[in-house]
Image (cartoon, rainbow, N blue to C red):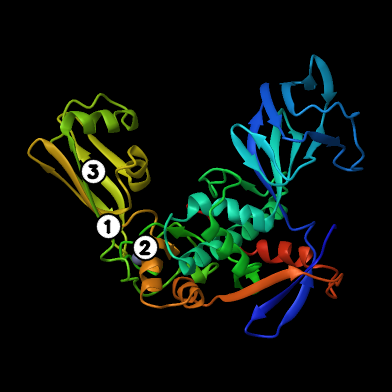
Amino acid sequence: MKSLFKIYVIPCLFVFSFSLSAMEVKVLLASFKDGECVLSAQKGFVLQDPVSRNGLQQEDGRKKFALECRQDGVYLDGKRLFKEKIIFKPYGDSCSYDGNKYWGYFLIKKVEDKYLLINVVPLEEYVLSVLKTESLPGWPLEINKVFAIITRTYCLHHIMLSYQKKLPYHIRNSNHHQTYQGIHNCSISKQAVDETKGLFVSYKGMPILAMFDCCCGGIIPADIEGSIDFKKAPYLGRTYACTYCKNAQPFHWSVSYSIDDFISLIQEEASFIVRGIKNIEVIDEDNAGLVKKILITTPTEELMLSADQIYRLSSKIRSYAYTIAKKGKKIVFKGKGFGHHIGLCQWGAREMVRRGFTYKQILSFYYPGTDLMRFVDGTERYNKKGGICQDIKGILSEVQLRSLA
Ligand SMILES: [Zn+2]
């Protein structure tokens, strides 16, 4: 363990300490079965063994490494550089891959038959990087503080999950988790991260699965069936509606397709050739009003599609709350919300800020029953059970959540 942290609940004085192996985030950037991986740094790299941290190569001032991944190792200039794992640590404060610049350093590690490229970055720098793509430009400081806290919380939750699943990384760099593209210079994001340093949303002392969407459409999450076990994650089961987003632009959406365009969208979901559409209707929805199943009647056969299948057809279908109808030669969707309707509603939170709510009030509204906690770099202290890592694993074994992200 490289560093230790202590946690305390705000405003309670409940204090305990824990150790995670340095509060660094391991972000998976890419994986290679074979092919080229190019890393660069303005002042060059020192190459280290990840375990001993001993330098592996004499300095030659090289600033760019064009690595060739093969099944028996990673090669540089036709010679095998390493077989299993290596660290590329920049002499400066950043390093680059695929057009993006990152804080921290790179770790390349072989897992089964692939080489994983992982950026190891301090947590706060990770949060700052993510805010560039996961917050909305031009929004005020207070809403950026909300996003900073939920970004940090989401990351900490995945760090814990990775311990449980024994993953070689903590979090992916794509919107599968949180979009991460490295360093940027947005000053309001920096201020938001600095002013919320270490803060995260917790339930029973642990970072929550801080889900959020763009606009909830006024759907009550507690009434949504099937995707989340609200007994295990009650903080996602809000029993009251968010009404703050109702005048926001994404609240209402509609999209219409010509019959031919719609057929080409759904064709690959069908096991027969779709030659026309006689009728289309929602045949199942849950108590929250979210669509579960759609029945499409064609001249020859019927086709049943799940809401997830429909959602994946096109980015123009923005949520799970909609009506669908055949009107003349068009298929028309009319919907509410943008996203999966669970967790924090970004446009609702934006309106709450406009009305004077603080980030604490907003987080409490969207994640009921949670506390705000903070970890800070601390002195070396262990709790009586020998470290929180064991506690984290124990708690996680009871929290089997299915992320919609
Ligand atoms: Zn909302």
Q: Position of residue 399 (x, y in %)?
A: 61, 63
Residue bearing the label numbered 2: 347
Label 2 is placed on what type of residue? Trp
Label 1 is placed on what type of residue? Gln
Does the CB distance between marks 3 and 2 fall below 8 Å?
no
Residue bearing the label numbered 3: 295
Ligand 1 quadrant? bottom left
Q: Secondary structure at mark 1?
A: helix
Does the CB distance between marks 1 and 2 fall below 8 Å?
yes
Numbered tag placed on residue 249 in the rendering: 1
Q: Position of residue 200 (x, y in %)?
A: 61, 68
Residue drawn at x 38%, y 53% as measured from the top left: 339
Which is nearer the N-term, disc 1 or disc 2? 1
Which is nearer the N-term, disc 3 or disc 2? 3
Residue drawn at x 69%, y 50% as measured from the top left: 165
Res 279 seen here: no
Queried on whether the Cβ of the residue with tag 2 lies below 8 angstroms from ligand 1, the answer reads yes
Q: Quadrant of residue 124?
A: bottom right
- Distance between mark 3 and mark 2 Cα atoms: 32 Å
